Every structure is written in structure tokens, then in C-alpha cells.
Image (cartoon, grey):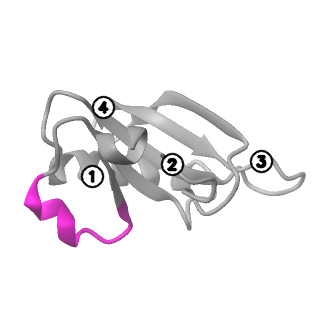
């Protein structure tokens, strides 16, 4: 079961969304977006960006997309200095993700255990 401090702060808003990449002329779908509570006069802080794949092993390509989305949000004025990139998988993770810093892997055990 996910702990209340999973994201490093109490979430204020959770949803999903799309980030437009004007350089690559594409859109990046983000399955889970977690924002901190809004603070007057401060940039909106993104606690986590997540990708969900229930029937597919997650690998470095998924993390690269999340990093790109984070960079684009930073350019748009969001506070992403502490954003946790999170991969949710029902099948598992590529061994290459084990060494990725700033990436949290969440499997079925963490979600339902």
C-alpha cells in the first residue's frame, strides 16, 4: 500500500494530462500527474509524473518520455525541482531501470500489498 509520504509531500491534486512538445511536434501523454497544494504567489509544484503499463514491461524509454515532459513543464513555468518520475507496472521492470536515479518503480505489491 502506498504511504502518505510517497511523493515527498501531501498531494493537492491528482490527474492525467498531455504535454505539448513544440520542438518534436508531438504530444506526451502523462498517465499520473501529482501536484502539491497550490500556494498563493508560487509556481505550481509537480510532485510526480507517472507512466502506467499493466501488460508491458517498463524500460528506459518510458522514463525518457517522463523526463522530456518534466523538462517541458519546467519551461512552461511549473516547479519541477523535486518531481519524482514514477513507473507503475503490473508486469515488471527492465533491469536497466534499477540504476535510474529519481525514478520510483511501483509494482502490484506496492499498490495492493
> Are the residues at dot 3 and dot 1 in contact (C-beta closer than 8 Å)?
no
Image depth: mark 1 or mark 4 in front: 1
Q: Is mark 2 on a helix, strand or loop?
A: loop
Question: Label 2 near label 3: C-beta < 8 Å?
Answer: no
* Percent position of residue 1, x then y: 48, 46
Residue identified by numbered label 4: 25
Locate residue 89, reporting x and y percent: 26, 39
Q: What's drawn in magenta, residue-wise?
A: 94-103
- Residue under label 2, please give it: 2
Circle nearer the N terminus (3, 4): 4
Residue topped by disc 3: 37
Residue 70 is left or right of residue 99, and the answer is: right
Question: Which residue was labeled with disc 1?
Answer: 63
- Give the alpha-carbon distance from disc 2 to disc 4, as whole Å: 36 Å
Question: Going from the N terminus, do you reach mark 1 or mark 4 first?
Answer: 4
> CA separation, marks 3 and 2?
19 Å
At which x and y percent is residue 87? 32, 47
CA gap, disc 1 and disc 4? 19 Å
Amino acid at each position: 500500500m502506498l504511504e502518505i509520504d510517497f511523493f515527498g509531500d501531501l498531494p493537492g491534486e491528482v490527474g492525467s494530462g498531455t504535454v505539448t512538445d513544440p520542438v518534436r511536434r508531438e504530444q506526451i501523454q502523462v498517465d499520473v500527474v501529482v501536484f502539491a497544494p497550490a500556494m498563493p504567489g508560487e509556481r505550481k509544484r509537480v510532485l510526480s509524473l507517472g507512466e502506467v503499463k499493466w501488460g508491458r514491461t517498463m524500460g528506459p524509454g518510458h522514463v525518457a518520455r517522463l523526463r522530456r515532459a518534466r523538462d517541458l513543464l519546467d519551461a512552461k513555468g511549473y516547479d519541477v525541482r523535486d518531481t519524482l518520475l514514477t513507473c507503475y507496472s503490473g508486469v515488471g521492470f527492465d533491469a536497466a531501470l534499477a540504476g535510474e536515479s529519481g525514478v520510483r518503480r511501483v509494482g502490484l505489491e506496492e499498490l495492493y500489498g
